[in-house]
Amino acid sequence: MNARSTAGTVALVGCGRLGSAILEGWLKTGTVAAHDLIILTPSGKPAAEAARALGARVNPPLAALTGARTLVLAVKPAKWREALGPLVGALNPEAVIVSVMAGVAAADIRAVAARPVARVMPTTAVAEGRGVAALWSDQGEARETARSLFHAMAEVVDLDLEDHIDVATATAGSAPAFIHAFVQALARAGEAEGLSADAATRLARGALRSAGAGVETGEALETLIARIASPGGTTRAGLDAMTANGDLDRAAEAAVRAAVQRARSF
């Protein structure tokens, strides 16, 4: 599969944590060449400066946007109108807008930009070319443009409904933090049972790497669990303790529900 996108010259608006991760992923995978990038950021960012050194244009005159076929909107949701509004007049009439913002409807962006819109919610692991990205658009051109920007650095998951973007954000975008928090709790539990803090943390982190290696095989999660949790064994005892009262499901449901509600409050 050719990593190079079909998005043409790309304008990235916003270079915070997610914007920087996307930028790093594009350059790592060759999806977008540095000389095809326009980066608009109100403050200096290491990722933007690294891209500038390779030929990207950082904060050029707005007239440069005429050559951009795609604008990726990666600003904070509360700031999107003030970020996008001044750019619309300079933007190529044929440009596509790709939003990676939570909680901002495509219709609202179209009302301001008057251009096709796709929404994508990627994880920050796109920086290493190992992310996952939920994609929704009801406009075919926008959907395929967005796909071409992410397919080389993420598993792209198409969604049928725009409302599912917020659920995808919680299930994938926020979930790495939930998983890290659980691994941190495992380390604390190991320490409580007598391990040193250093040993408990290193072992818990190693377990996370092992779990990730299992996921990379593509096998069903149930299969991966069964491979480790033999009947009557130590792992099965631990799993039974975790799930006996539905606590694990309730914790996951509470985390996803809270994240969805927050996304829909923007």
Image (cartoon, rainbow, N blue to C red):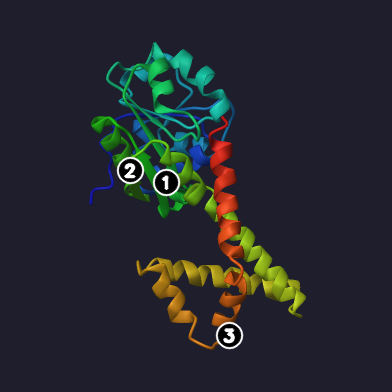
Specify which label sits upstream in the sequence, 2 or 1: 1
Q: Residue at left 47%, top 51%?
A: 125
Give the amino acid type for the residue marked by disc 3 in the picture: Thr
Secondary structure under the numbered disc 2 in the rendered image: loop
Check disc 2: other Cα within 10 Å, few if <14, some if 14-19, many if 20+.
many
Query: Residue 235 in the image: x percent, y percent?
Result: 56, 81
Give the amino acid type for the residue marked by disc 2 in the picture: Thr
Q: Which one is closest to the eye, mark 2 or mark 3?
A: 3
Specify which label sits upstream in the sequence, 3 or 1: 1
Residue 262, picture quadrant: top right
Give the amino acid type for the residue marked by disc 1 in the picture: Gly
Q: Quadrant of the C terminus?
A: top right
Left or right of residue 211: residue 223: left
Left or right of residue 229: residue 92: left
Residue linked to disc 3: 234
Query: Residue 132 in the image: x percent, y percent?
Result: 41, 51
Check disc 1: other Cα within 10 Å, few if <14, some if 14-19, many if 20+.
many
Residue linked to disc 1: 25
Residue farthest to the bottom, as pictured? 232
Q: Which of 135 and 90 lies nearest the eye of the viewer? A: 135
Task: Name the disc covering residue 31, or none.
Answer: 2
Residue 163, picture quadrant: top left
Query: Residue 190 in the image: x percent, y percent?
Result: 70, 75
Q: Residue at left 59%, top 55%?
A: 178
Check disc 3: other Cα within 10 Å, few if <14, some if 14-19, many if 20+.
few
